[in-house]
Every structure is written in C-alpha cells, then in structure tokens.
Amino acid sequence: MPQSEAQSNAVAATAGKVPLDVAAISQELEAASSSDILDWAARTFAPRVTFGIGFGVEGCVLIHLIAERKLPIDLFTLDTGLLFPETYELWTALETRYGVRIRPVRPVQTVEVQALHWGPQLWARDPNKCCELRKVEPLRRAIAGMEAWISAIRRDQTPERATAPVVAQDKRFGVVKINPLVRWTAKDIWKFVLANEVPYNRLHDEGYPSIGCHPCTTPVGEGEDPRSGRWRGQSKNECGLHVGQPAAEQS
Ligand code: SF4
C-alpha cells in the first residue's frame, strides 16, 4: 500500500531518533487509517512498541489489524486474576485464530494474598487502590523498556476520552501513547467485527458492552451509558490507565 503523505511527513519527523514532535505527528496522522497508524508505530518504534489488550471488542479489532499485517508489535494483557471465564476463553480464541501470543502480566499479589494484606474484596471498599495494585503497577512493568504503548480507546467512550489524540506523550509512564481507533464509533467497530468474523467476548451479546474484572462489571440496561456497568454505584469510571494527564500535557 502506498505510504500516505501524512505518514511520510511523520516518518521524516522521527528520522534519526530526533525528539518526536508528538503534537505535529498526531495532527498529521489524524486522518490516517488505523492500519497506517499501526504501520507507522511499528516502523518507528519496533521492537519497543507494545499493545495492551483488555479484551474489549476494540482490542480484538486491533489484534486483527496487527496480525493481518504481521507487525512486530509486542502484545500483552493485564491478567488481574479477576477476569470473567468468557474473557479467558476469548484470550485463547484470539491466539488460536491469529497465531499470536498475548503475554500475561500479573499483579505482584494474587487475589488471596491481596486479601490478607488489604482485607477481602478491596474492590468494594477502595477500587482505586485495587486498580492501582492489579492494573496500574503491572502496566508500569509491562511497558518498562518500551518506547511506545498502543491503546484501543475511542473518543466517544467517555468524556475523559473525548479529546484523546492519535499520538501523545504519556508523561506518567514515560512512553509515547498511540490510539489508532480514536475516531471509530461503536457502530464502526461492530461493522468491522461482523464483516471480518473477529472473535469477541460473548458477554457482549448478554448486555455487557464494556467488560472488565467480574466484581466491578454488571450488565447495562437499554438506554444506559455503555460504561455505566463498570464500577456501578461509584463515581469511578476509569481504571487509571488512560487518565491522569492534563489535556495540555497530552499533546
Ligand atoms: S476493576 Fe475492580 S477488581 Fe479489577 S482491579 Fe479495578 S477495582 Fe480491582
């Protein structure tokens, strides 16, 4: 496929490992296809570029796009030990269908050891602490040594994600963060999944539009916000992986 003008400019801007002007690159890639963004990410950062799949339907689309182009992008998932059985089934299905390995990154403490140290069901009393222990700290280890981290977030998922750029400097984790699907709508995602028979979590067909750990995920009723089933009844609506940077720092 011919390289787009946006890609050419972006690649020129990164030639010779000069410091990246992520704001300019993000603007140039704003209109690029997700596949072109992934190509750019692999060319610019491989082997120090990774994609952390949370097994949402968007992540399944990214695995499809990465695998069909055989891009040298590391794949991992944060296995909190509290995922749904259906999510573990999907993990196996994706590895089988696409011939890839999604490496597990686990918390330092098992669920049982965490209960001994912090008390049982920490997620019900202090979900931020629980996410810090079981997601944020493992993420730091997962991306240690990496230069770039790919995520599957979309702008229309939450108000916090509405201004997410295609490329940003993630100062919390010290990597470039790349969001190839930011412009996709939920309709775009499902059209692609059905057309390409991409494996997805069957809980999506049972009223779970957004799926995380089983203690913090409930089905969503008709007309409810798709993410309202996450941490229901609490003010929390992000696990702490994709927030925390002032908008001005994201460019
Ligand atoms: S989603 Fe819930 S169970 Fe999972 S790490 Fe966060 S608070 Fe803990």
Image (cartoon, rainbow, N blue to C red):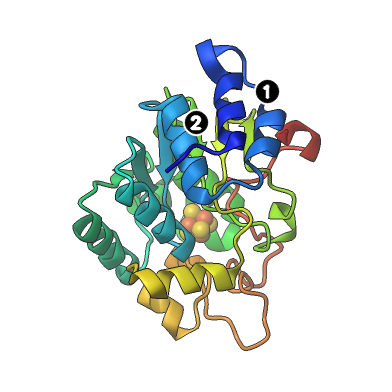
Is 151 rendered above or below residue 211? above
Q: Residue at x 43, y 53 (%)?
A: 62
Q: Residue furthest front?
A: 2
Of badges 2 and 1, the one in the foreground is 1
Horizontal side of 20 relative to 112 (left or right) equals right
Horizontal side of 159 relative to 106 (left or right) equals right
Q: Residue at x 59, y 12 (%)?
A: 18
Horizontal side of 7 relative to 93 (left or right) equals right
Asked whether the viewer can see residue 171, the reply is yes
Is the shortest distance between ligand 1 and the CB of mark 1 under 8 Å? no
Q: Residue furthest right?
A: 248
Task: Please tell me how crowded label 2 is: few (under 14), some (14-19), or many (20+) other residues with Cα within 10 Å.
Answer: many
Q: CA distance from mark 2 to mark 1?
A: 14 Å
Is 194 rendered above or below residue 107? below
Is 192 rendered above or below residue 149? below
Q: Which mark is residue 21?
A: 1
| Label 1 element class | loop
Q: Which mark is residue 148?
A: 2
Under mark 2, the amino acid is: Ala
Q: Quadrant of the C terminus?
A: top right
Q: Residue at x 32, y 35 (%)?
A: 72
Q: Quadrant of the N terminus?
A: top left
81 or 179: nearer the viewer? 179
Asked whether the viewer can see residue 80, the reply is no
Exactly how many numbered labels are in the figure?
2
- Residue 152 point in image, percent of width and height: 52, 52
Quarter residue 97 falls in: bottom left
Under mark 1, the amino acid is: Asp
- Residue 160 point in image, percent of width and height: 72, 53
- Residue 27 point in image, percent of width and height: 70, 38
| Label 2 element class | strand
Q: Are marks 2 and 1 in contact (CB under 8 Å)?
A: no
